[in-house]
Image (cartoon, helix red, strand yellow):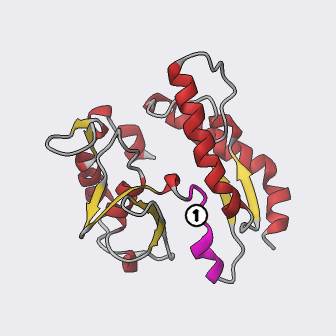
Amino acid sequence: MTFLYNLDKKDLFVWATGVVGIFSMERLEQKLQEMVNVQDYRELKIPCYTCVTDIDTGEPCYINTGNPIAYSIASSTITPLFTAKKIGNKSYIDGGFSDNLPVKPLKQYPQKNLAININPLRGEDLSTFKSLTIRSILIMIRSNSIPSKKLTDAYFEVEGVANMHLFDFDEIEMAYHAGYNELKAKWAELSQKLV
């Protein structure tokens, strides 16, 4: 959480020059790399997959080899706002564009899974261009989650983040507490599905 509290918008919104996209995430990637200091997924104690979207094919890619920081940045790249992340000879964007609830790679493990959706539909007035655009994106993201939702053993949606703003860093603690408190309240019910 310290990293998120110390994150400044100038770390995220760096003008991209000479590439497609308004902003670059290079500064954020550098800060993450310094803090986490992990070069390869094999260094992680728990198996981890990152879902990214191959911008050429539009297909989801579930990555568990290579640099997890680079792929996490790719999976956070909302185009055209941010420049697609080039890794090797491929360019990737946010995995949410192709699979926003990436449980497929977890099905190979004997443990049951809990999928958490942090993109619920907002209950807001849809009379502005901005609100209609956000709603349209959330509907698109939600629709590609439906097949994955069927693969989960337990599913939970954090409703308290619905009206929070995407890049409002002042709301990070509110989002954290909403998720924590809602999950805590539903844990007895959810945990029964994970036994």
Quarter residue 55 falls in? bottom left
Quarter residue 116 falls in? bottom right
Which residue is at the far left? 18
Q: In x, y percent, where is residue 83?
A: 29, 47
Q: In x, y percent, where is residue 24?
A: 25, 44
Residue pictured at 48% horizontal, 57% vertical: 95
- Residue 140 sits inside the magenta stretch: no
Residue pictured at 76% horizontal, 68% vertical: 153
- Residue 104 sits inside the magenta stretch: yes
Q: Residues within 10 Å of mark 1 (few under 14, many from 20)?
A: many
Lateral position of residue 105 relative to residue 81, left or right? right
Residue marked by disc 1: 102
Lateral position of residue 59 relative to residue 23, left or right? right
Residue pictured at 69% horizontal, 62% vertical: 147
Q: In x, y percent, where is residue 12?
A: 31, 39
Which residue is at the far front? 57
Quarter of the image that includes the C terminus: bottom right
Q: In x, y percent, where is residue 47?
A: 50, 76
> Residue 92 versus residue 179: which sits nearer the camera?
92
- Residue 137, compared with residue 85, is above or below; it is above
**Which residue range is magenta in the image?**
99-108
Q: Amino acid at mark 1?
A: Pro
- Residue 128, compared with residue 193, is above or below; it is above
- Residue 107, compared with residue 70, is above or below; it is below
> Residue 186 versus residue 22: which sits nearer the camera?
22
- Residue 164, compared with residue 7, is above or below; it is above
Residue pictured at 23% horizontal, 37% vertical: 14
Asked which secondary structure carries label 1, the reply is loop
